Amino acid sequence: MPWGVGPARGRRVTLGGRPAVRAERVVLTGAIDLAGTLRPLAMLRGDPSVHLGVGRFDRASLTPEGPGAITVTWRPGAGEAQVTGFGDGGAWLVDRAPGLLGCDDDPSGFDPLVPAVRQLWRRHPGLRLTRTGTLWHDLAFFVVQQRVQTVDAAAQWRRTVEALGTPVPGSDRLVPPAPDVVATMGYHELHRFGIERRRADALRRAAQAMSRWGHRFDADDPSAALSALATVPGIGPWTRTCLAATTWADADTVILGDAGIPGAMSWLLAGERDGDDARMLELLEPFRPHRQRVIRLAVTAGAWPTRRAPRAARRDIRRS
C-alpha cells in the first residue's frame, strides 16, 4: 500500500469547515505512569509533531491509512485515558493506543537484585515501554539525531517538520514529511534545516527504502524490518536499536553506539565513570530479558556520571 493512501475508519466530523475522521476510545491504564512512559517521544524540544503536557499528550504521524493525529488525556490516579484520533489515520492510531501508552508492556519477572536498580524500580513502578508502531516517523526522528547534540537535533527536526510536514484537521500537530517527499530531495536541500550531507544522505536513503517497501514492515515482528534497514547505508546499530526500543518496545534491546548510555550503565551498575558498549553489555547481561527496562529507568532518573570532558564543537551547516 502506498504511503498516505488507504480507507478511513471512525466517525467523520467537520472541524473548522474541514472534514476530518475522528475516533475515540477509553484505555484502561491502571497504575501506568503515562507522562514518564511517553516522555521519550517528546525528547526534542519544540517538536511540531509531538507535545507532552500535564495530563495530555498529542502526536501526529503518517499511517497506512494516511496522516493522522492522536490526543491522549488523563487525570492522575484515574487509571484510564481518553484517546481521540483525527485525520484519515486517526482511527489507526487510536486502535494502537494501548501499545503507545505502555499497556502491552509486561514487566512481570523484573525483580532486580542490584540495589541501585531495585531502588529506581521502586521509585518508578509505573514506568512502561511505549510502542509507537510508526516506523517511518521514528526512523526519520532518530536519523536527524545521529552524531549531533540534542539541542541541535531538536532545532533541525523542528525546521524540517515545519517546512515539509502535513497538518491534520482537528489537531495542532504536524505529521513529519512522508518518505516520498524526502526521497526526491537532494542532500543540499536539507542543508537549510541544518542537516549536513552525511545525515542528509542517510535520511534520503532511508526514505527511498521506505518508499519502495511501503508498509510491509509495519508488523508485530521487528526482525524483518531491522534486517532490511541494516542494508541501508547510514542506518547503523544506534538507529536500529533505538527503533527496536521505541517502535516495537523490545524490553531487552540495548542501545548500541550511544555517546552517553554506556557511561550511565557503568556508573549505575558498577560505580565506574567510564564505559563502552562491551562493558555495558557485560553489566546488563544478568538483567535479560529486561535490559532496555534498566536503561529506561536510568535515563528517567538521570543516573549519569558528572561530565568531565567538554562537549564537541557545534557547527551550523546553514552558515557554510
Image (spheres, rainbow, N blue to C red):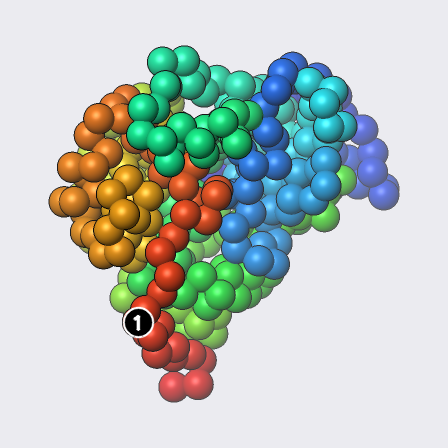
Report the side of 276 relative to 184 (left or right).
left
Residue designated by label 1: 309
- Which quadrant holds residue 6? top right
Using the image, determine if residue 238 lies above or below residue 198: above
The quadrant the N terminus occupies is top left
Residue drawn where x is 43% and y is 16% of the image: 106
Residue 309 visible in rendering: yes
Residue drawn where x is 53% and y is 19% of the image: 103
Residue 187 visible in rendering: no
Using the image, determine if residue 318 lies above or below residue 121: below
- Which quadrant holds residue 183? bottom left
SS class, disc 1: loop
Looking at the picture, tell me which residue is in the foreground, 73 or 60.
73
Looking at the picture, tell me which residue is in the foreground, 218 or 296.
296
Using the image, determine if residue 298 lies above or below residue 307: above
Residue 252, horizontal then vertical, whole percent:
29, 28
Residue drawn where x is 49% and y is 27% of the image: 122
Residue drawn where x is 36% and y is 31% of the image: 115
Which amino acid type is marked by label 1? Ala
Number of residues whose C-alpha sits closer than 10 Å to that of mark 1, classed few (under 14), some (14–19) or many (20 or more)? few
Residue 98, horizontal then vertical, whole percent:
56, 20
Report the side of 111 relative to 8 (left or right).
left
User: How many numbered dots are placed on residues in this image?
Assistant: 1
Report the side of 71 relative to 248 (left or right).
right
